[in-house]
Amino acid sequence: MNKKDLKFLKELVETPSPSGFEQPAQRRIRKELEGVVDELKTDLMGNVIACIKGVGENNPRVMLAGHCDEIGFIVQYIDDNGFIYFSPIGGVDPHLVPGQRVHIHTDQGAVLGVVGKKPIHLMEAKDRETVVKFKNQFIDIGCASKDETAVLVNIGDPVTIAVKLEHLQGDRLTSRAFDDKMGAFIVAQVLKEIRKRGPVKADVYGVFTVQEEVGLRGSKTSAYGVNPDVGIAVDVGFATDCPEIDKKELGEFKLGDGPIICRGPNINPVLFQMLIATAKDGNIPHQIEASGRPTGTDANALQMTREGVAAALISVPLRYMHTPVEVLAQSDLENAVALLSDFLGRVEKREDFIPN
């Protein structure tokens, strides 16, 4: 990955965007795509919709969806001593939160705080084995009273854990919020690659969806508006190449072995086979996931839009999902971009994806 692309990924991942508060990240995406796409707009839900028109008329519509929201918190209450109580946005593990630095994103900018934690010396033995409920966790920003805190922080302000993208060994990266700003990054990169390669026969819609972590909400509304023939969600998948993960339950997925192509009832079978053929013809490393139920991603909403859409899911293996230390391989991002870019060059007719 070149320095410019890595800079875009870093800025996108580090820009706060808890579900319902995605606009800072969406502004960064719009900036990246200005002058690249034919159409660029934001809808009422906050989804950013970018389109590159294909050549000809009555073109098939292909929608690539990467959700730009992340898990986080929201300010709920400020007590008399200035401590801030909060509730989670999305699926946050309460084990991981005490002792973390956080940013509270206010109208005046980010306010640094820490999630307080009783010292282990003062805890009874039974309490050391108990998860502290979110309603009992609090943020300390260093203020001494409710009035002092309320000058800086408002009820309803979003909160994120204060970590940044960093390099591990080889091509491994770690950060919060790879789920799924990594997917939004891939969709943007595909649009740039399509523009670079030249016209395709499909109208390609890159949609940066909102509120996936709280119910696939942005993909439901944007897919209805775009009305695609083909919809591909780009998200993260569980890497199983680390301790304590059961391969017999989830399958075997390794960092660096390429994007994961999902197969199952959520996935159009013709589209699946076309993606596999694209990967094989292009010598693009890939892995196959079996899912016997809806995938829990934007692919669910895409498949069930209007009278039905040919849906697929491309995932990038991710370790430690929904933690502040998610880990992925840069090569998997690059191979996902290559797979989707090559695939879009093959789409020619709407009826191609009707199962026989």
Image (cartoon, rainbow, N blue to C red):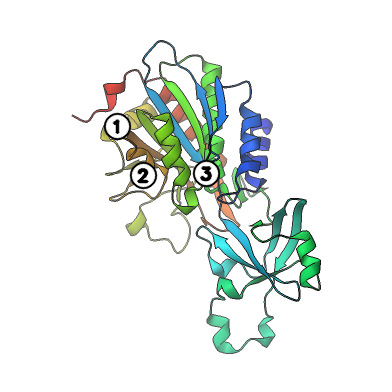
Disc 2 or disc 1, which is closer to the eye?
2
- Give the residue drawn at x 78%, y 51%: 108
| Disc 2 secondary structure class | helix
Residue 115 position within the rendered picture, expressed as x and y whole percent measured from the top left: 68, 68
- Give the residue drawn at x 63%, y 25%: 34
Task: Determine which of the numbered discs, if any, sits on residue 180 in the image.
Answer: none
Given the image, on which type of amino acid does mark 1 rest? Answer: Gln
In the drawing, does residue 8 fall left or right of residue 240? right
How many residues crowd around disc 2 within 10 Å: few (fewer than 14), some, or many (20 or more)?
many
Residue 17 position within the rendered picture, expressed as x and y whole percent measured from the top left: 61, 48
Disc 3 or disc 2, which is closer to the eye?
3
Viewer can see residue 271: yes
Instruction: Give the Cα separation between the discs numbered 2 and 1.
Output: 19 Å
Given the image, on which type of amino acid does mark 3 rest? Answer: Val
Do the numbered discs 2 and 1 sit on residues whose CB atoms are within 8 Å?
A: no
| Pointer 3 residue | 210
Of label 1 and label 3, which has the lower sequence position? 3
Quadrant where the C terminus sits is top left
| Pointer 1 residue | 273
How many residues crowd around disc 1 within 10 Å: few (fewer than 14), some, or many (20 or more)?
few
Q: Nearer the viewer, residue 9 or 355?
A: 355
Task: Determine which of the numbered discs, if any, sits on residue 300 in the image.
Answer: 2
* Total number of numbered discs in the rendering: 3
Given the image, on which type of amino acid does mark 2 rest? Answer: Asn
